[in-house]
Image (spheres, grey):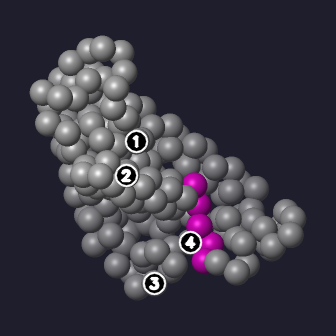
């Protein structure tokens, strides 16, 4: 029996899934898993941003606890509010990332990599939706950020999903390389 991280590293002829199916048959659900995770992230992200817009518009920051507070800046740039005004470029990059992830999941055999891809794609789509629908012109909208820790740049659910997905990809690669190295 192999785990998800080693499934992509081992040749298909020696890899078996935990349910006894052949690798080609067992990874058919991987693109669907990626799509479900991405859709869940997109929905949660847009619902929380809708809440933030209705609850926080026109008001000062709200303390939640410790250093956490709700705040409502709009970000027309990239991560950490850098490079304001390059939203159209960021939007195009996000579309390309989502398309690449959708294409690459066809050959994935790892559930961990699939979940990571879904998190990154869902987060990219969540912020892309802001750029498309929250501005006067296509891709000129601003991303809604509202989670403020006061010691870290303000972010949203999409940003968290992208970061967590990136960390999961790193873990997946590290586990895959460790398992592939002869003892």
Mark 1 / mark 2, whichever is N-terminal: 1
Q: Which labelled disc corresponds to residue 140? A: none
On the picture, is 97 further left or further right than 167? left
Circle 4 Cα neighbour tier, 10 Å, few/some/many (<14 / 14–19 / ≥20): some
Label of residue 112 in the image? 1
Q: Main secondary structure of the magenta part?
A: loop
| Percent of width and height locating residue 115 | 42, 41
Quick one: 181 or 78, which is closer to the camera? 181
Percent across and percent down for residue 182 are 24, 52
Estimate how packed mark 3 is, as few (under 14), some (14 to 19) or many (20 or more) residues with alpha carbons within 10 Å: few
Magenta region: which residues?
153-158
Marks 4 and 3 sit apart, C-alpha to C-alpha, by 12 Å
The residue that appears at 68% across and 56% down in the rendered structure is: 52
Q: Are marks 1 and 4 in contact (CB under 8 Å)?
A: no
Between the C-alphas of marks 1 and 4, the distance is: 32 Å
Q: Residue at x 31, y 23 (%)?
A: 17
> Is there a contact, CB below 8 Å, between mark 1 and mark 2?
yes
Q: Secondary structure at mark 3?
A: loop
Q: Which sits earlier in the primary sequence, circle 3 or circle 2?
A: 3
Q: Badge 3 is on which residue?
A: 82
Say if 48 sits above or below 155 in the image.
Answer: above
Of badges 4 and 3, the one in the foreground is: 3
Mark 2 or 4 closer to N-term?
Answer: 4
Distance between the alpha carbons at the discs numbered 2 and 4: 38 Å
**For this rendering, which residue is in front, 80 or 176?**
176
Q: Residues within 10 Å of mark 1 (few under 14, many from 20)?
A: many
**Can you identify the residue that label 2 sits on?**
175
Quadrant location, the N terminus: top left
Q: How many badges with numbers are in the image?
A: 4
User: Label 3 vs label 1: CA separation?
Assistant: 31 Å
Indicate yes or no whether the magenta region holds residue 119: no
| Residue 74 disc label | 4
């Amino acid at each position: 029996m192999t785990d998800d991280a080693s499934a992509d590293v081992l040749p298909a002829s020696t890899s078996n899934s935990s349910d006894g199916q052949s690798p080609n048959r067992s990874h058919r659900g991987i693109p669907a898993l990626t799509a479900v995770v991405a859709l869940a992230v997109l929905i949660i992200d847009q619902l929380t941003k809708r809440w933030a817009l209705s609850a926080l518009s026109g008001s000062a920051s709200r303390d939640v606890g410790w250093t956490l507070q709700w705040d409502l800046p709009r970000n027309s740039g990239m991560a950490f509010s850098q490079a304001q005004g390059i939203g159209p470029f960021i939007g195009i990059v996000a579309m390309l990332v989502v398309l690449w992830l959708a294409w690459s999941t066809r050959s994935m055999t790892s559930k961990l990599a699939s979940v990571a891809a879904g998190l990154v794609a869902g987060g990219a789509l969540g912020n892309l939706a802001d750029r498309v629908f929250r501005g006067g012109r296509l891709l000129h909208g601003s991303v809604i950020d509202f989670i403020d820790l006061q010691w870290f740049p303000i972010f949203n659910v999409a940003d968290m999903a992208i970061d967590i997905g990136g960390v999961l990809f790193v873990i997946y690669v590290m586990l895959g390389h460790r398992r592939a190295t002869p003892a």
